[in-house]
Image (cartoon, rainbow, N blue to C red):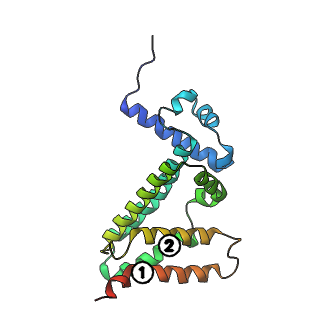
Amino acid sequence: MSPRALTAEEREIQKKQFLEVSKMLVIERGIRNVSVDDITKACKVAKGTFYNYYDNKESLFLEMVWQIYSQVLADAEALLKKTSPEDIRQVTGNFLKNFLYNPQQVFFLSNHDGLEHLLANTSGEQMDNFHDREVESFARILQMLGRDTKRVKPTVVHNYTHAMYFMSISNTIITESIMETIDVMVEGLLNYLFDEEEKDA
């Protein structure tokens, strides 16, 4: 007799297990040292089950990264909803600095090299989809800020934010005055976010 098909709820639970177990293994061993075999063994399922949900290890890890990344964006959205217009610039600046000075996402910090390796080995289509999701999220936040996304471009904010983040965790490219540099970069982003629309006013 063939095994019973899982319900939609059971499939969702199993997929969540893959993500949680994979994150635990990656934090423990690093991205490069975790295989599909490791993941399925830890989840106590057949290897074929993994491929019911993901095309490869990279697609799973990208989804795991997206979960962590999207939580930061959700935190930003929640903060903006309760911020008055007159405080929006200062609150935005503080949020950026708090994230860069005190990164809460241990995963990103402890797996920076592994993330670079992951991105280098991810298909162009997967990366395009991930990038599009990121930019859409930035566009949503810009709309919450009341910005005109034709003038203040989500792609520019996306690129700038990534540059600040990777610079903040690098101890080889920049070794001196990192915090001061971050302050200058954050101020530059705030100028772009809040002053761009007033240039032609």
Q: Amino acid at mark 2?
A: Tyr
Q: How many numbered circles are shown?
A: 2
Answer whether residue 45 is visible to the viewer in this image: no
Q: Position of residue 133 (x, y in %)?
A: 41, 56
Disc 2 to disc 1, C-alpha distance: 10 Å
Three-letter code, disc 1: Tyr
Q: Quadrant of the N terminus?
A: top left
Instruction: Classify residue 147 by image quadrant.
Output: bottom left
Relative to 125, residue 168 above or below: below
Other-residue count near label 2 (Cα within 10 Å), few / some / many at <14 / 14–19 / ≥20: some
Residue 182 coordinates in the image, percent (x, y): 57, 79
Q: Secondary structure at mark 2?
A: helix
> Could you say which is closer to the camera, residue 96 or residue 50?
50
User: Residue 165 got which mark?
Assistant: none
Residue 83 located left or right of residue 116: left
Q: Is residue 174 above or below residue 21?
A: below
The quarter of the rendered structure image containing the C terminus is bottom left
- At which x and y percent is residue 129? 44, 52
Residue marked by disc 2: 160
* Circle nearer the N terminus (2, 1): 2
Residue at the farthest front position: 124
Q: Is residue 1 visible?
A: yes
Question: Residue at label 1?
Answer: 192
Q: Secondary structure at mark 1?
A: helix
